[in-house]
Amino acid sequence: MAPLSRRILTIETTCDETAAAVVAEDLHVLSSVVASQDQLHRRFAGVVPEIAARAHVERILPVIDEALVRAGVRLADLDAIAVATTPGLAGSLLVGLVAAKTLCLAADKPLVAINHLHAHIYACRMAAGRDVFPCVGLIVSGGHTSLYRCQAATEFEYLGGTIDDAAGEAFDKVASMLGLAYPGGPAISKAAEHGNERAYAFPRGLTHDRERLDFSFSGLKTAVRYTIAGPGRPDFRAAGLSHEQVADLAASFQAAVVDSLVEKSMLALARTGLARLCVGGGVAANRRLREQLAETAARVGAELIVALPELCTDNAVMGAIAFETLRAGKTERLDLDAQPGLVRHSPLAEP
Ligand code: KG4
Ligand code: ZN
């Protein structure tokens, strides 16, 4: 009988999704459970870190249990337990890490650390079903908008990123201004379907600066806000926009974000000399972005791989990257700490 592919439990609690999955080394997904906290953060139009951490505490054990049950696997059957330890919200990361360490101790299993950003790009590796490295990686989510030279699954070099808001953050806040639901990405995308993306000429932050692989979205956010109601009008949400205006504003805003992302991604390909672009993170689920990336990549002769929509937003399946770490023989001690902050290094951005 062929030897059974190794299986691991992966845990993801970097932000506001409590997720666990059981994945096999051949990247077969045995189970995937995601408990979303959208309902809890909706009235704040963004993630509130303390609320997220408390909700993780309540959900983590049922979510892990469910992942094991659905996979038909006992703790004893696992070859390792992996958890995302960086970057993310400190309180949220700690909940997943403590759960993972406790299970490792109780079941005598090795602990593997996952870098959440590496995992977002690994979702492209899973979508492709073959090796995708080296490539340029674009991670575009609620907390991150950055470009990397991805030499290998766990070997990233920072090329550039947002100097203010992440693209997903801008989607969420603009949706709130337009009276649309949270999370804002899917809501804006839907509203934009019936809108005219040329109705408003919104800024494409930093796209004029061909030296930098950076993004800026806060000026765009302000431009939308002033278009809805001029400066000095605090109650802009009551501006009484028509359906048509909301659709046009949503489409024009979305086009500005997409243009910036596409433009700098193509610049990153040109600057690195790489011919493959991998895109992950919640905003990568955006249809307009996927279409425009595909069109532009084809035009410049680059290969484009975007994570499957369900693996764009936070999930534990992409934690299958832990097998790469495991194969490299790297496991962690149980005194491992979470690292909320992002360590950046950008040789290409230096003069
Ligand atoms: O990757 P993710 O689940 O969490 C972080 O690591 O941040 O990304 C969540 C973000 C939210 O800001 C959400 O509005 C955005 O991804 N998002 C989208 C879409 N689906 C989710 N943005 C644009 N279009 C979408 N279809
Ligand atoms: Zn994420």
Image (cartoon, rainbow, N blue to C red):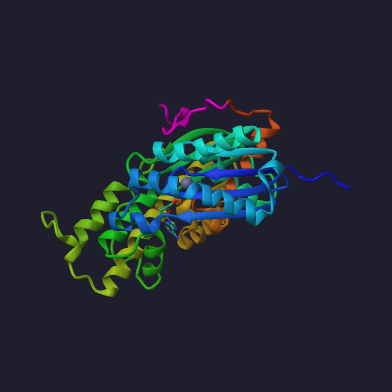
User: How many marks on residues?
Assistant: 0
Looking at the image, the residue that sits furthest to the left is: 232
| Magenta span includes 102 | no
Q: Position of residue 305 (x, y in %)?
A: 59, 52
Asked if the magenta segment contains residue 348, the reply would be yes
Up the image or down, 47 lies above or below 290; here it is: above
Instruction: Using residue 350 as the reference point, say whether residue 223 is left or right of it.
Output: left
Where, by quadrant of the figure, is residue 160 drawn?
Answer: top left
Camera-side residue: 296 or 250?
Answer: 250
Quarter in which the C terminus is drawn: top left
Is residue 42 something one can see in this rendering? yes
Q: Residue at x 19, y 57 (%)?
A: 226
In the rendered image, the vertical position of residue 191 relative to residue 96, given as above or below: below
| Residue 196 at x, y percent in the picture | 34, 69
Q: Where's residue 16, x and y in %?
A: 42, 49
Query: Which region of the structure is painted magenta?
Result: 334-351
Q: Position of residue 225 (x, y in %)?
A: 22, 57
Query: At x 64% / y 50%, what residue is drawn?
Result: 126
